[in-house]
Image: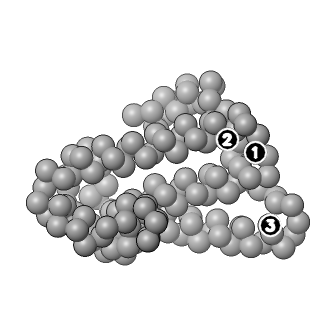
Amino acid sequence: MICYPPFNSIVGKYIPWGANDHVFFWNDTITIILRIGIIILFTIYVWATLTLGLKASNLTNRGIVKKFPYSIVRHPAYISKNLVWWLTLLPVINWKFALGMGFWSIIYFYRAITEEKHLSQDSEYREYKKKVKWRFIPFLY
């Protein structure tokens, strides 16, 4: 629940947030390259969200989605959203912002773990996990 309003606004008063929507990196070339990366990650996020459709839910099983990008990793929306946040944090990173972003990344990690724990009660999801071995990043984790 901490990921949603009004809770995230309350926590945001105490946990620093440095990610921003109008990010400029160290030079024009790096800015263009990383903005393209951000657009790709946002595209994955939107695609994952649209693929879930009406099956999107917190802690209720409305069916298992196996289509791309869920055919590659089990949590494409969470990882793409987190990677965008980290990328947009890079130009202004300091230890407070890094700790704050670490906090939110851990929240999303445990959110994914909790969802998997609940969904694993379904035999179809257990079979899906055997086919889609990567939780967040292919060939890594």
Residue position for label 1:
93
**Proximity of marks 1 and 3: CB atoms separated by less than 8 Å:** no
Residue mark closest to the camera, 3 vs 2: 2
Residue occupying the point 39% across, 34% down: 1
* Residue sitting nearer the eye, 73 or 60: 73
Task: Pick whichever of labels 2 and 1 is earlier in the sequence.
Answer: 1
Task: Pick whichever of labels 3 and 2 is earlier in the sequence.
Answer: 3
Residue 58's place in the image compared with 88, above or below, is above
Residue occupying the point 30% across, 70% down: 132
Residues packed near mark 1 inside 10 Å, few (<14), some (14 to 19) or many (20 plus): some
Q: Quadrant of residue 39?
A: bottom right
* Residue sitting nearer the eye, 30 or 54: 30
x and y percent of residue 42 in the render?
56, 64
Q: CA distance from mark 1 to mark 3?
A: 16 Å
Q: CA distance from mark 3 to mark 2?
A: 20 Å
Assign a secondary structure to mark 3.
helix
Point out which mark residue 98 bears.
2
Residue occupying the point 37% across, 66% down: 134
x and y percent of residue 102 in the render?
58, 41
Task: Pick whichever of labels 1 and 3 is earlier in the sequence.
Answer: 3
Q: Amino acid at mark 2?
A: Ala
Assign a secondary structure to mark 2.
helix
x and y percent of residue 91 in the render?
79, 52
